[in-house]
Image: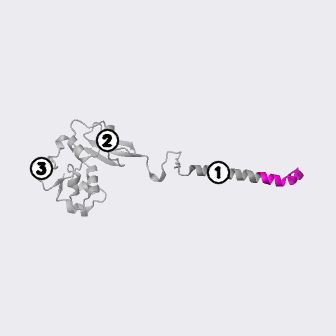
Amino acid sequence: MNSILEKNKPLILLFLSLAALFMGVIVLLKIRSLEGQEIVIEKCSGEQDNGTEATIKVDVQGEVKNPGVYEFEKGANIQEAFERAGGLTKKADTKYVDKNLNRAELLIDQQKIFIPSLSEESNASGLSKEMSGNPDKISLNNATLEQLDSLPGIGPSYAQKIIDGRPYKTIEDIKEIKGIGDSTFGKIKDKISL
C-alpha cells in the first residue's frame, strides 16, 4: 500500500492542490456575489444585544377609553397609542390634542401621553381656566410647548418632557424631570402654576 502511495504521490498532490484551488475560487465567487448586500445576524435566544429592546412601553392617561401602560414595537406613533387605548373619550379636549400633539410623532420608551378633558380645557391664551385670572403664570398641566419653552432655562426638549410628565399635583413635581433641578426650578417657580 505504501508503495502505491509513494508511486502516485505527485498525482495525489496535484489532485489535492486542484481541489483546494477549486474550493478557493468557489469561496471567492460567493464572497463577491454578496458584496453590497446587507448581512443581518439575528440572535436565536430571546435576549437583545447591548440592552436594546425591540419593544417600548408608553403610559397613556387622561381622556382615553382604556388608560394604562401599553407595549409597542419600536417605530409606533402617538396615533397608535390612542388606538391601543381605545381612542379618545367624548370628554377629551380634541382642540388641545390637535394643537399640541403630533399624531405621527414616534413614541419613546417610558413616555407619558396625557389627554386633558374639556373641563381642563385651555382658554384662548392657552392658560388653564383656573389660571385665566393670573396671566403672569404658565400652567404646567395645560400650557402649550411654546409657552413652556418661554420659561427661563427651559428649551423645546424640556418643554416636551414637561408635557409628557403631565399631570402634576404640585409645581415641585417638575423637579422629577431629569435635568430640571433646584437651580432651574428657582428661576421658574414664580412663573408657573398647576
Residue ID for mark 3: 132
Residue 7 lies in magenta, yes or no? yes
Residue mark closest to the camera, 1 vs 3: 1
Q: For residue 14, say whether it is visible.
A: yes
Image quarter for residue 13? bottom right
Q: Which residue is mark 1?
A: 27
User: Where is residue 73 shown, x and y percent of the image?
Assistant: 40, 43
Q: CA distance from mark 1 to mark 3?
A: 75 Å
Q: Is residue 13 magenta?
A: yes
Q: Which residue is mark 2?
A: 79
For residue 98, side relative to residue 23 (left or right)? left
Residue 44 spot, x, y in % from top left: 53, 45
Inter-mark Cα distance, 2 to 1? 49 Å
Mark 3 to mark 2: distance in Å?
31 Å
Say what amino acid the circle numbered 2 marks: Gln
- Give the secondary structure at mark 2: helix
